């Protein structure tokens, strides 16, 4: 690994292609990374809430435009379903997806899925955004195993535009809210 | 000067305070800079149009989120007026200004002025944004001279939100446009 020192004013602001080319692909294929300790290895789809992960990895000291990056492993439930529930009652809800192409080509190099944190009834509901970069399936023959090829890169950031709170509706809709929470506890992300 | 090498994914995205603390203040006081060749020395208030400057300094190869940074010297016309005309018929028009404070304090460390490129009748009208960082006047006793204390940092970027073109009005308002252009040629930015 090369020895680096980051000059003042430089921040980790990788383009989508940078993430795939310099971090995700080397990690998935067991190659050395260009820089250590900037993409942390941590289970984003585990017991910790996004706010806890944000605090654990220095989020509060970042500039407004900076995000946190993680290598994490997907937790497939089947060949097309992945478990993206988080902590207690939370889940990452898919908002949109797009294919990342190598610059200036139509060669797909990764999928980028955009998620929004949902946890109805929690103050954190809607407060977090996560972008997940994964290699195309054909380069992931072993997605169900624990091999390094099942790694994805997750980019965690605060949501600057949380959905507006509906004031005064909570008591009237308590029952509805309860059933929504129950629904969420069972909900499993089915988009892959 | 320390020896640096920038790892993949890192971009020059300085915060306002980074610009002032690590680049503007050292430059104005003759101290060494943390990194060479990232803030270019060039006359932003001279003969070159923003589009020419953008091309000269590698703007087209930057990521969408990257800007170009320059050290330039103000051209005072008097103690309170600065000439910010550009090229032929262009000018930087002040849109807003704010004071930059040292992080977590109310200690002013610089002024940040936001400009928009205006050149009525040109395709470049409204297409560029420039943010100018200057040290507070008290640390600039010599602003009228050619000393290094009259340096400012200019941050040049493309305007993603150009003002909407009014279609069909040009022929009817040709005379008005002409007089606007003449007005602009005489216009001198008077906000300092």
Image (cartoon, coloured by chain):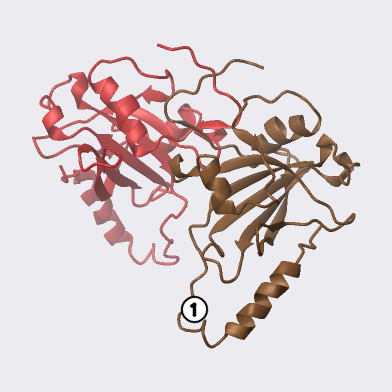
Chain colours: A red, B brown
- Dividing the picture into quarters, in which one does residue A151 lie? top left
- The answer to whether residue B103 of the structure is visible from this angle is no
- Image side of residue A183 versus residue B47, left or right: left
**Front one among A125 and A112:** A112
How many marks can you see?
Answer: 1
- The answer to whether residue B163 of the structure is visible from this angle is yes
- Dividing the picture into quarters, in which one does residue B145 lie? top right
Name the spot of residue A167 as percent of width and height, x first: 45, 65
- Image side of residue A59 versus residue A9, left or right: left
Q: What residue appears at the point 43 percent right and 12 percent down from the top-left corner? A: A2
**Front one among B5 and B48:** B48
Q: What residue appears at the point 13 percent right and 22 percent down from the top-left corner? A: A145
Subunit bearing disc 1: B
Which quadrant of the rendered structure holds the C terminus of chain A? top left
Which quadrant of the rendered structure holds the N terminus of chain A? top left
**A184 above or below B148?**
below
Q: Residues within 10 Å of mark 1 (few under 14, many from 20)?
A: few
**A108 above or below B168?**
above
- Residue bearing mark 1: B166
């Amino acid at each position: 690994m090369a020895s680096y020192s980051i000059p003042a004013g430089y921040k980790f602001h990788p383009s989508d292609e940078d993430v795939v080319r310099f971090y995700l692909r080397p990690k998935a294929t067991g190659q050395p990374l260009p820089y250590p300790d900037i993409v942390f290895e941590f289970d984003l789809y585990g017991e910790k809430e996004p706010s806890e992960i944000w605090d654990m990895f220095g989020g509060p000291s970042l500039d407004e435009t900076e995000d946190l990056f993680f290598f994490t492993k997907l937790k497939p439930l089947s060949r097309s379903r992945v478990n993206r529930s988080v902590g207690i009652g939370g889940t990452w809800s898919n908002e949109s997806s797009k294919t990342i192409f190598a610059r200036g080509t139509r060669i797909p190099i990764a999928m980028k899925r955009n998620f929004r944190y949902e946890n109805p009834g929690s103050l954190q509901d809607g407060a977090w955004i996560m972008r997940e970069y994964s290699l195309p399936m054909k380069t992931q023959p072993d997605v169900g195993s624990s091999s390094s090829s099942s790694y994805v890169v997750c980019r965690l950031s605060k949501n600057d535009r949380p959905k507006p709170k509906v004031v005064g509706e909570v008591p009237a809709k308590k029952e509805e809210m309860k059933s929504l929470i129950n629904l969420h506890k069972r909900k499993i992300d089915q988009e892959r």
